[in-house]
Amino acid sequence: MDTKRARRGYPGDRRRRLGQHFLAAGGPVERVVGAIAPRRGERFLEVGPGRGAITWPLLAAGVRLLAVEIDPALVRRLRQIPDASADFTVVQGDILKVDLPELLDRELPPGRGIRAVGNLPYSVASPAILRLLSLSERFADLTLMVQKEVADRILSPPGTRDYGVLTLLCGARALSARLLDLPPGCFDPPPEVHSTLVRFTPRPPLFPSREGYATFAAVVKAAFSSRRKRIRNSLSAGAALSTPQTEAWLRSAGLDPAARPEEIPLEGYLELARHLPEGPRGPVRRPRDPAN
């Protein structure tokens, strides 16, 4: 057994189970905090603070900080931060399951203008990002560390291999930018991949309701359900429409039925969601989501 790790309270098996790769002290932390650029009086939500590598500098900058951490051993450690003020709250919980709106209302009122940060565990990075972006109206920005492969998918332009569902679901709610890349040696334990710090800046709402976004998401997932097919074929299966109906739907949105899903930009999928066709039983309100 690694007795040094045991004394710290972070056994290797727990770290592997939770997908924890902690940001190393020194240069890596300074680069990340410099990219975040916290200012006194700002309100922050930190997802997965771990050992507090980012937490400490944020508190030193004078921010109001709410941290959500799933590991009870790490929560105990964070609650022992010396001289931590009333401006710091740590909550044990899973970011995918906690009542985030209630938590933000209770700990970081008033509602808007919160900044989110986090070194996200690789195993939950995509669903965590999408959950945070579902509350994009609450945030001024979100600066999140993810696996470089995930960042590449988020940032890919149309027509590229990585462009797909994650690109579009994120793009519909925020503008994204790569801030910096970090090699494995910047983390403990070192992962097998590089990591990327991505900034999400929420865009003005593109949908009149959550139902509108859900319809858009279902259209996107149906389109990419068979990536190698032409979009008329994948959408036809996903929406339970005939090929002529699907081709008419695509043309009504100004799209080429022979295009492949990865060739269509965000605006094209927004138009598809706005031009839902008539099905055998009336309007097709939401194509079948292949993920469900």
Image: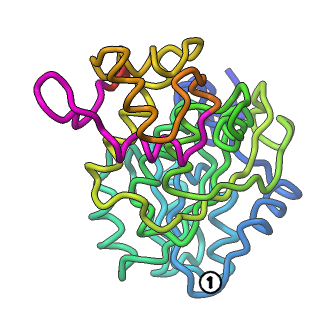
Q: Which of the two residues, 38 or 215, is positioned nearer the viewer here?
A: 215
Horizontal side of 171 relative to 135 (left or right) equals: right
The quarter holding residue 37 reads: bottom right
Q: Is residue 209 above or below residue 214?
A: below
The quarter holding residue 195 reads: top right
Residue for point 45% across, 41% down: 253
- The residue stretch that appears in magenta: 264-288
Residue 76, x across and y down, in percent? 47, 53
The quarter holding residue 277 reads: top left
Magenta stretch holds residue 112: no
Q: Is residue 259 above or below residue 277?
A: above
| Few, some or many residues within 10 Å of mark 1 (<14, 14–19, 20+) | some
* Mark 1: amino acid: Gly
Residue 16, x across and y down, in percent? 60, 25
Horizontal side of 191 relative to 251 (left or right) equals: right
The answer to whether residue 72 is seen in the rendering is no
Residue 6, x across and y down, in percent? 62, 33
Q: How is the image coloured?
A: rainbow
Magenta stretch holds residue 281: yes
Q: Residue furthest bottom?
A: 41
Q: Which of the two residues, 272 or 192, is positioned nearer the viewer here?
A: 272
Quarter occupied by the C terminus: top left
Horizontal side of 212 relative to 264 (left or right) equals: left
The answer to whether residue 175 is seen in the rendering is yes
> Is disc 1 placed on a helix, strand or loop?
loop
Q: Which of the two residues, 210 or 266, is positioned nearer the viewer here?
A: 266
Residue 55, x across and y down, in percent? 62, 64
Residue for point 46% across, 38% down: 127
Residue for point 83% across, 61% down: 31
Q: Which residue is mark 1?
A: 62
Q: Which of the two residues, 243 or 266, is positioned nearer the viewer here?
A: 243
